[in-house]
Amino acid sequence: MSILRPTVQQFVIVGKQLLEDLSKHELFNRYFVTKQHGHQLRTIDSIDEFHIEEFAANLGQTLFVVKHFDIDPNYQNTNNNNNSSQHDKIGQTSDYDGGKCFSILYSNKCSIMGSVALLQHIRNLKTMDEPINNVPAERPLHNLAMQNTLITFSGIPDKFEAQQLLTLTRYMGAKSREDVTNRTTHLVAGNPRGTKYRRALELGLAIMNVSWVRESYRLAQNDLEFEASMSVIVQHYKLKPFHGLHMAFVGFKEDDARELSELTTANEGIVVDAADLSCTHIVVDAISGFDDTNTQMLSSVNQTSNAHIVYKEWFWASLEMEGKANEDAYSVPGFKNQARRSSRPRRTSTGYNSFSMMLSPSLDYSRSPESMLVNQNERQVSRAQSVSCIAEEQQDLSQITARHRACLELLQTERNYVRILETIVTLFKVPLENPDAADPILPMTDVKIIFGNLTPIFEVHKKMLNNLTGLIETDWKETNCIGKVFVSHSIELLKAYPPFVNFFEDTKKTINNCDQKYPRFHAFLKRCQSRIECKRESLTEMLIRPVQRLPSISLILTELIKRTDESNPDKKYLVEALESIRRVMNLINEDKRKTEGQIAMFDIVNNIEDCPPNLLSALRRFVCKVEARLLFMSNDNGIVPSKSHKVVLFLFSDLIEICKVRSLKRSHSSKGNRTYVPIPRSINHAQSNKMSGNKKEHRHLDELRLCDIMKVYKKCESVEMTDAFVIQARPSPRYDQNFRYYPFVIDDESISKAQFIERLEDCLCTCDDPEQVIDYVPNDLPPISNDEIDFGFASLLVHSMEKSRLSRVLSIRQSLLSPSLKSQRMHNNH
């Protein structure tokens, strides 16, 4: 049934105050004043002035505009429900329009529209010359907050409350339907039960709490832009999956039980004891098909209870899909789980009595209690058969050769490995990459980081498993060339493994961050971990298998080589296969070192003020860093370390970057008063860094190329330089008077003087840059005396540090001067 009728010929504003309020809106003035629709406008100051006889002739084309609606005039005088006074507060009529004007107009079958809906209609017009359509007398329209929505109600036992909710949705422009169909947009449910609820889950509809209707009506009272279907509103007022359920947890560890209890409470459930008669669901810490449910674990269950006894996978599946999953798909075999039934029979919707248990296409809900009982019986039979099979296998293993036994071990480990990869792909990767719902569990960027490099590994090992199965299991011969399988796939292994292994730490970090950031992803991981395929292993624990696989293959191939005769044609292939596997492992380690070195170089360059632009180079490799103090000669000819500033030596493969350590936390005072400049709360972190100058931890002092180093003195003669070492380098344009001497004292707990010198000499002997010719020859030089050291260059560096510090202090003091002092100083100078 259409809500709109023919166009309005006359608008009647009920209430003088309402007319004054509407006159303040630009939309109202543009339509009724600017566009000459004013002749259609009429006002009555009070509902007492309303006489139906005046409008009887043209009542079908007259629209009465009021401020507030009553909840439902048909129920307010006839129903004495205890909640009626509370419900009526939402739509109480105010003095704007005379107290009972809505009831009077409604009883006289007048067309009624709220002032909010009127302004929204005007806003939606393409041009101000268009007319406004009337509304049916039986369908007053307060606002358009639920326009274009089709709502179905379920699980609301109070007839009066259900009627009020239906009335409110119609006041907001919504349509309603008794059954859930493909056209339904929202289901308003009082509890997570019933056929309509399951059908809505199947269709992926938004299932809303009853408070969504009332709060939407309240929020739309004076907000023209409010829409009840806004994502933030829908997410906030969704019906929680455990709403009204009484749940107990059996067999869980203390930490796990605490987490489940907190999540139950957060999702509007109630945690009770398993023996409580009010308990509706008992969640068991067991995995279907993997764990044997401990009957003693369920001894506390009241045998007369109608509670559902389900595996923990049901709990996580409900949180993942944000709706109560079907208990029958997760019920523990051997217990009669009957849903609680009301004493009054409920009418079921036609057409949906039998539907699939697939509550979400991305989840596997195809299991039934019968199939699980059959699987349990099959497992019991298989256990009985396995006893005899083990004896036969032991006899068979005693008859096979050592080489064949090693090959069988290789095949079994490869089969287990491929099974784990297949579990990761089918159970985790595919559902996350192809979400069926409009709201994906995880952003695609994070999914790509986690699984982007896994597919090539899975594909190459599937092919290798097929080849190994044919050679070892299907058609075994002692002369079968097992190593040839690895040799033929060595190029694929070389391409597949390094990207995954080198970025595995990023993968783990992404999983941990997403696990904490996205509750549905956390539930998804827990649900998958509760599946028999995972055997209680987490996604991170399974993803580490590719990192461990190549070393495992290397060990098995080494053992297989020992068990293979020299005359066997497979011998040379096995040796070549082992070399190819080790080549891949070496490449992974080398790439990992390069990647870590490049990341370290980026961090270093970004943290040095006045950093030389050529410091970042693809040919340069970061080795280590060490904190030290630069020695210089004081005015009284004493050798002292620089007390004002520390220096940091960044050792690279072809140079040493010498930086001053900056003090980022420094307070300055003027005349004894500390100056504090507060940062406004509205300024974000990036802006605050900009205001504070975005200071970096280090400032560039000097760059010492390794090709300029001539000698490294590990010891000094003087007592004050016992712990020092001295680097002698060629003259430079900055200091061309003599050789440059760099006397340092290591001031770092993480690395000693001997360790740093050893790494420095390694770099001097194996310089990565072929253009640099290094004359340095490592030898144990005798201790150097103070007279042999030219402290001129060291003093120059110290002077540079002190000069920058002094200039900064002067600039800060200058900025702290008040404008009056500045002007007074300028006046005195004149």
Image (spheres, grey):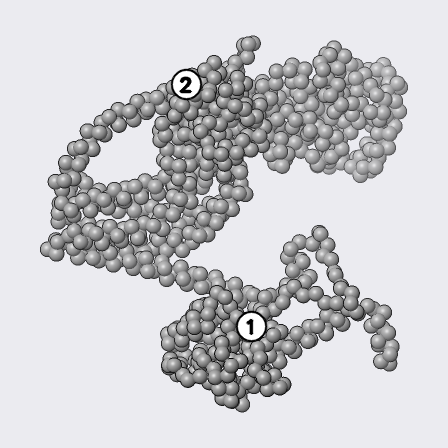
Q: Is residue 830 left or right of residue 184?
A: right
Seen in the picture, residue 338 relative to 771 is either above or below; the reply is: above
What's the residue at 69%, 34% (across, down)?
226
**Marking on residue 647:** 1
Residue 561 falls in which quadrant of the image?
Answer: bottom left
Few, some or many residues within 10 Å of mark 2 (<14, 14–19, 20+)? few
The amino acid at mark 1 is Val
The amino acid at mark 2 is Phe
What's the residue at 71%, 14% (across, down)?
81
Seen in the picture, residue 55 relative to 446 is either above or below; the reply is: above
From the viewer's side, name the closer residue of 391 and 297.
Answer: 297
**Marking on residue 758:** none
Q: Position of residue 314 (x, y in %)?
A: 46, 28
Which element is circle 2 on? loop
Q: Is residue 136 left or right of residue 512?
A: right
Q: Is residue 578 visible?
A: yes
Which element is circle 1 on? strand
From the viewer's side, name the closer residue of 202 and 375.
Answer: 375
Residue 827 falls in which quadrant of the image?
Answer: bottom right
Q: Is residue 763 visible?
A: no
**Marking on residue 335:** 2
Q: Position of residue 345 (x, y in %)?
A: 54, 10
From the viewer's side, name the closer residue of 567 and 463.
Answer: 567
Q: Position of residue 391 (x, y in %)?
A: 18, 32
